[in-house]
Image: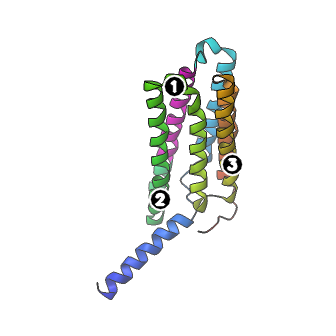
């Protein structure tokens, strides 16, 4: 390898490291906050009309799963659009770095509930807790490119996920507040974090 090739490779490595340790601005606070608003509406519907929107654990999983999947697609689409609009190679590196964290987590969050509903529907009460803990892991993994305060929503989702699994197991099923409460607070907290213009940590 020539000196020029070696220098080019080193520059590429530096750019990749900067993409990981620099704030990724593709996430839109408004999109995340919108998911929080929809979470409020769904929780109110399940509280007011439990026979129609909260009849059983399977219905909980389907309704909230569709909301979270739609939210993921909306936020992902917004991130791609904002990145392409910037027309910056660094932004593209940062989008790729974020994708490596988010996409595997999304696949886990999708495959696990589908398998549970298909083969062991009586264990559906465990799914919201798994979703919340996965969201916590994403928040912690994204810390280098997010505001420092992202640890608080991450900690919230982690604690709610663990507590929710035990509470749902203890009472024998899911309730609107047990499922909706953590998502409402967590999404609004993430939207607040993303709107904060504080200094970002470096890896």
The secondary element bearing badge 1 is classed as helix
Q: Is residue 62 magenta?
A: yes
Q: How many marks?
A: 3
- The C terminus lies in quadrant: bottom right
Query: Which residue was labeled with disc 2?
Result: 97
Q: Position of residue 25 (x, y in %)?
A: 56, 56
Query: Which residue was labeled with disc 3?
Result: 155
Sequence-earlier tag: 2 or 1: 1
Query: Which residue was labeled with disc 1?
Result: 62
The residue lying toward the viewer, choosing from 87 and 197, is 197
Sequence-earlier tag: 1 or 3: 1
The secondary element bearing badge 3 is classed as helix
In the rendered view, would you say 109 is above or below 5?
Answer: above
Task: Determine which of the numbered discs, if any, sits on residue 96 in the image.
Answer: none
Residue 85 visible to the viewer: no
Please report the residue visible at 44 percent of the width from the left and 36 percent of the height from the top: 111
> Splitting the image into 4 quarters, where does residue 37 fall?
top right
Residue 49 visible to the viewer: yes
Q: Position of residue 28 (x, y in %)?
A: 58, 48
In the rendered view, would you say 184 is above or below 5?
Answer: above
Segment colored magenta = 57-78
Distance from disc 1 to disc 3, alpha carbons, whole Å, reads 25 Å
The secondary element bearing badge 2 is classed as helix
Q: Are marks 3 and 2 in contact (CB under 8 Å)?
A: no
């Amino acid at each position: 390898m020539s000196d020029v090739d070696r220098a080019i490779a080193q520059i590429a490595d530096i750019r990749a490291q900067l993409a990981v340790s620099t704030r990724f601005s593709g996430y839109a606070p408004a999109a995340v906050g919108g998911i929080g608003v929809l979470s409020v509406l769904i929780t109110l519907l399940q509280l007011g009309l439990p026979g129609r929107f909260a009849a059983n654990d399977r219905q909980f999983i389907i309704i909230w799963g569709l909301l979270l999947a739609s939210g993921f697609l909306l936020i992902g689409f917004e991130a791609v659009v904002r990145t392409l609009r910037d027309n910056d190679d660094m932004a593209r590196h940062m989008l790729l770095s974020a994708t490596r964290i988010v996409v595997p987590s999304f696949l886990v969050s999708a495959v696990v509930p589908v398998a549970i509903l298909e083969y062991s529907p009586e264990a559906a009460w465990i799914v919201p807790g798994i979703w919340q803990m996965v969201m916590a892991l994403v928040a912690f993994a994204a810390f280098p490119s997010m505001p420092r305060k992202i640890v608080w929503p991450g900690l919230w989702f982690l604690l709610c996920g663990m507590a929710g699994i035990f509470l749902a197991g203890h009472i024998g099923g899911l309730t609107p507040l047990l499922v909706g409460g953590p998502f409402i607070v967590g999404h609004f907290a993430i939207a607040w974090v993303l709107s904060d213009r504080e200094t970002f940590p470096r890896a």
